Image (cartoon, helix red, strand yellow):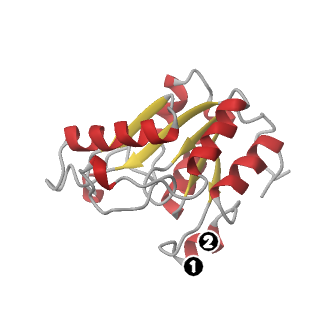
Amino acid sequence: MNPGRSARPVTAVLFDRDGTLVVDVPYNGDPDRVRLLPGARQALELVRGAGLATGVVSNQSGIGRGLVSHADVRRVNARTDVLLGGVDVWLYCPHPPEAGCDCRKPRPGLVLRAARLLGRVPGECAVVGDIGADVAAARSAGARGVLVPNPATRPEEFAGAPESAPDLLTAVRTLLDGDRP
């Protein structure tokens, strides 16, 4: 057990969208370009099958940059939701990094809001993502963070992650087993 980490079981798993569940298409506003990453649907099926709540928390700065609209992001999320078989909560931050908002990861706002909407305390949530901001948002909110690196993950993000897994299915199986990756 890690000092300072709650012994509470995970009752909700929050996922980053781009690079974690779907192929990262920068500023994607086209639902036809959504492609699930290997293991994404199976990972969600495992989480749902275990009776855990699910959510997606995603930075979508393309809205604030004027590259995509809220409607575009909602359409992409809806297509992703269908491909994944359903997610309980979808939340995104529309602000560019310089906005200084509380919802943009690595800040905790999205994680805290998702936990509240799911009726969970943050310490019962795990956040699975592909970059350091995902893990930092989890840590800031008091949740468990698991990094699933991909080619875009910087080495220092991987080195700084308290928990990591080689792929999404391994991350989810580890969370469900109550072990640490």
Q: Quadrant of the C terminus?
A: bottom right
Q: Extreme top residue here?
A: 119
Q: Amino acid at mark 2?
A: Phe
Q: Which residue is mark 1?
A: 155
Residue 36 in the image: above or below residue 157: above
x and y, in percent, of residue 20 in the image: 51, 56
Distance between the alpha carbons at the discs numbered 2 and 1: 5 Å
Left or right: residue 178 versus residue 111 is right
Q: Residues within 10 Å of mark 2 (few under 14, many from 20)?
A: some
Q: How many marks?
A: 2
In the image, 132: left or right of 25?
A: right
Badge 1: how crowded within 10 Å, few (<14), some, or many (20+)?
A: few
Picture quarter containing residue 102? top left
Where does the image place residue 11, in percent across and percent down from the top left?
Answer: 69, 31
Quarter of the figure with residue 126: top right
Marks 2,1: beta carbons within 8 A: yes
- Name the residue type under label 1: Pro
At numbered mark 2, what does the secondary structure look like: helix, strand or loop? Answer: helix
Residue 5 visible in image: no
Residue 119 appears in view: yes
Residue at image position (51%, 63%) is 131
Q: Secondary structure at mark 1?
A: helix
In which image quadrant can residue 28 be found?
Answer: bottom left
Residue 178: image location, x then y, percent? 82, 43
Query: Residue visible at 86% across and 50% down?
Result: 1
Residue ID for mark 2 = 158
Q: Residue at x 23, y 55 (%)?
A: 62
